[in-house]
Amino acid sequence: VHIRINPHNLHDKTEEELSALLEHPLLSSPERARSFGAKTYFYNAHLQYNQLTGKLDKAFEYHEKLLAYWENHPHRIRKEPQRYMKALSNCAGLCLRMKKFATFEKTLQKIDRVPVRSFDDEAERFQNAAHLRLLYLINTGTFTTNTDLLRHIDEGMDKYERKINVARRLAIYYNLAILFFITGKFNDSLRQILAIIEHRKVGVRKDILVFAHLLLPVLHYELGNNDIIHG
């Protein structure tokens, strides 16, 4: 069972309900989970609960336990590389939030080394790694526009176009726009903003669309496009 809850909308009652759910005997100990899938869901349930309720240190512990469990079963990684990559990506995202940058870099290296078996696996690895690398640059304040990285992302966005999910594609455009804006590359930032606004499925990330419309006039101002601003 997967429960998607916005942590900003987490009410006391919801937290109590989730806490009660974790008190179920089947979720009391990993030893109660007999299969590989059941054990991974056990760790996922606990890490998501702790992350949602702001207990980040505890959530990180469960991320580590989940990854260790995967890595003790390398044949499952070979069989289900995308599930393992998702676990790695989720852990890397929490590392950024907690400013565990050394652990983040090690986790990202693991994503790069995951053995892939298909074009779909390659696309999954690309979109996760590209998204995380951009977040890392923004979160660490290392705003230098790495030419090789940007070329790699640009090529990957074209190569895996049909495989990258819309929400992730829009997030990559969003992070590129921020990176270019901060480094004064306003034309490049504008290109990303227009890609967001003109995307036919932009409605799946209304938050990003709002940001794009806010940044658009600022970019036109920086570029001296006064006729567009006052048009």
Image: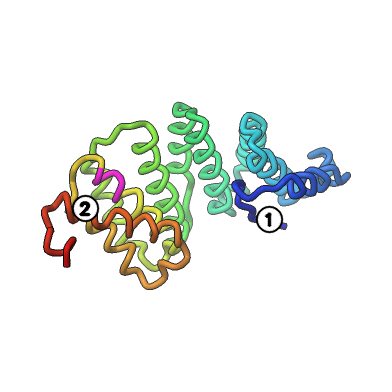
At mark 2, the secondary structure is helix
| Apparent side of residue 46 relative to residue 170 in the rendered image (left or right) | right
Q: Nearer the viewer, residue 40 or 203?
A: 203
Which residue shows up at 29% across the image and 44% down it? 179
Task: Note whether residue 224 is visible.
Answer: yes
* Three-letter code, disc 1: Ile
- Identify the mark at residue 3; answer none if there is no mark: 1
Residue on which disc 2 sits: 219
| Apparent side of residue 132 relative to residue 79 in the rendered image (left or right) | left
Which residue shows up at 42% across the image and 62% down it? 164
Q: Which of 13 and 67 is in front in this view?
A: 13
Picture quadrant where residue 109 is located: top left
**Which residue is farthest right?**
25
Residue 85 place in picture, x, y as percent: 52, 48
Picture quadrant where residue 112 is located: top left
- Residue 34 is covered by the magenta coloring: no
Residue 46 place in picture, x, y as percent: 71, 41
Q: Which stretch appears magenta?
A: 177-181
Residue 25 place in picture, x, y as percent: 88, 44
- Residue 180 is covered by the magenta coloring: yes
**Which residue is farthest bottom?**
200
| Apparent side of residue 93 relative to residue 54 in the rendered image (left or right) | left
